[in-house]
Image (tube, rainbow, N blue to C red):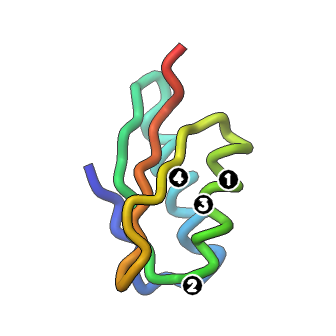
Amino acid sequence: MQLDLTNLACPMPIIKLKKFLAEQVGQTVSVEVLLTDKGGLKDIPAFCKQKGLNCQLLKNEPVIVFRVESIKS
């Protein structure tokens, strides 16, 4: 699954990701998040850490791609 947040400036990518995650309550999450805002390189990992999600940078240019997953217990 992909969440295309390209061409959105901060703080919109975080707001959209937060909304997406709220819609996935009770489900295992695994989504690729696509960004163009360089601020996301810090913001997305910080947000994921705060929410207890795994976050892996897959690609940095020209589009930033993170894989965000719920942590399996």
Q: Could you tell whether 53 is left or right of 20 in the image? A: right
Name the spot of residue 2 as percent of width and height, x first.
29, 56
Where is residue 12, by image quadrant? Answer: bottom right
Looking at the image, tell me whether mark 4 or mark 3 is earlier in sequence order. 4
Where is residue 42, by image quadrant? Answer: bottom right
Q: CA distance from mark 3 to mark 2?
A: 13 Å
Q: Residues within 10 Å of mark 3 (few under 14, many from 20)?
A: many
Q: Secondary structure at mark 2?
A: loop
Name the spot of residue 23 as percent of width and height, x first.
45, 41
Identified by mark 4, the residue type is Lys
Q: CA distance from mark 2 to mark 1?
A: 16 Å
Residue where numbered disc 4 is placed = 19
Q: Are marks 1 and 3 in contact (CB under 8 Å)?
A: yes
Q: CA distance from mark 2 to mark 4?
A: 16 Å
Q: Are marks 2 and 4 in contact (CB under 8 Å)?
A: no
Residue where numbered disc 3 is placed = 44
Identified by mark 2, the residue type is Ala
Looking at the image, tell me whether mark 4 or mark 1 is earlier in sequence order. 4
Q: CA distance from mark 4 to mark 3?
A: 14 Å
From what the image shows, is residue 16 above or below residue 24?
Answer: below
Residue where numbered disc 1 is placed = 47
Q: Residue at x 45, y 38 (%)?
A: 69
Q: Residues within 10 Å of mark 4 (few under 14, many from 20)?
A: few
Q: Residue at x 39, y 81 (%)?
A: 61
